[in-house]
Image: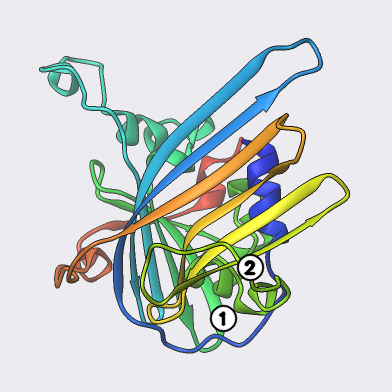
């Protein structure tokens, strides 16, 4: 997954961000790599995302816990365990809230089981695989970078969405951009020889939820990321 994260980080340059349509999304990630030894490694996971003006809320889709698992003495739900022991802080298991306030990006993780909000300062963004770009958090692809990808002749099956792509030096990038909703429906990158593939596919929900989770954090305990460092 490291190469895929690097691809996403490389997709954008800083640019201005305006309020785009509110969206509820489901995002499927997939990567495949073939090693020099002929071993194929695959990884896939999904997230949900709420996009609102000034807010992006994402959560990993986790497998269901076995019946009774969370109630056994000494056994905690994965999200609770991630914050109950300092050295086991795992941002992948927690809900993430990115907000834009006064032109500055604020990042926090939310443990719903323990009712805690963990604030992450800019100096620690790298440690939780966040690059600090509001544009990339909000659009998932910086529009400034999108404009650098030439329009493609590839046909789109989605009204109002258009493919952009570029191929050079044995690698390619492809983006299916929904111009009305201002979001990529597909982002792909890989090697033309088939040794690597990274894909992100978005499903846009019909309508949007009025229940915004960042408005329900008033009673949560506030903690700092430094609390979880050794």
Q: Position of residue 50 (x, y in %)?
A: 31, 65
Which residue corresponds to the image point at 38% horizontal and 42% vertical from the top-left? 46
Q: Residues within 10 Å of mark 1 (few under 14, many from 20)?
A: few
Quick check: 219 above or below 230?
Answer: below
Which residue is labeled 2 in the image?
152
Q: Is residue 31 left or right of residue 85?
A: right
**Residue 104 bears which disc, if any?**
1
Q: Nearer the viewer, mark 2 or mark 1?
A: 2
**Disc nearer the start of the sequence (2/1):** 1
Residue 149, image x, y percentages: 70, 70
Question: What residue sits 70% from the left and 40% below the top?
Answer: 3
Q: Residue at x 56, y 87 (%)?
A: 103
Q: Of residues 204 and 115, which is closer to you in this image?
A: 204
**Quadrant in the picture for the N terminus:** top right
Q: How would you rate the neighbour count of disc 2 (Cα within 10 Å): few for under 14, some for 14-19, many for 20 or more? A: some
Where in the figure is residue 193, as x and y percent of width and height? 77, 33
Relative to residue 216, is residue 83 drawn left or right?
right
Q: Is residue 147 above or below residue 118?
A: below
* Foreground residue among 208 and 32: 32
User: Which type of secondary structure does the marked residue at label 2 adopt?
Assistant: loop
Q: Quadrant of residue 134?
A: bottom right
Looking at this view, is 160 or 216 the one in front? 160
Place of residue 10 in the rendered image (x, y in percent of width and height, measured from the top left): 73, 59
Q: Is 96 situated above or below 112?
A: below
* Badge 2 vs badge 1, beta-carbon distance below 8 Å: no
Please tell me whether mark 1 sits on a helix, a strand or a loop: strand
Q: CA distance from mark 2 to mark 1?
A: 35 Å
């Amino acid at each position: 997954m490291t190469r895929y994260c690097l691809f996403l980080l490389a997709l954008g340059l800083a640019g201005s961000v305006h309020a785009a349509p509110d969206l509820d999304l489901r995002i499927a990630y997939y990567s495949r790599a073939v090693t020099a030894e002929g071993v194929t490694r695959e990884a896939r996971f999904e997230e949900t995302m709420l996009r609102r003006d000034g807010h992006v809320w994402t959560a990993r889709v986790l497998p269901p816990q076995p019946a009774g698992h969370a109630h056994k003495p000494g056994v905690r739900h994965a999200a609770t365990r991630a914050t109950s022991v300092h050295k086991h802080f795992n941002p992948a298991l927690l809900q993430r809230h990115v907000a834009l306030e006064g032109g500055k990006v604020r990042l926090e993780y939310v443990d719903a089981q323990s009712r805690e909000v963990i604030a992450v300062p800019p100096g620690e963004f790298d440690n939780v695989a966040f690059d600090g770009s509001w544009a990339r958090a909000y659009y998932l692809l910086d529009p400034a970078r999108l404009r650098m990808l030439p329009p493609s002749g590839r046909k789109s099956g989605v009204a109002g969405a258009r493919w952009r792509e570029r191929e050079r030096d044995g690698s390619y990038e492809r983006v299916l951009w929904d111009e009305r909703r201002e979001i990529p429906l597909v982002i792909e990158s890989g090697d033309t020889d088939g040794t690597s593939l990274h894909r992100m596919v978005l499903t846009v929900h019909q309508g949007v939820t009025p229940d915004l989770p960042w408005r329900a954090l008033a009673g949560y305990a506030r903690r700092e990321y430094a609390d979880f460092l050794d």
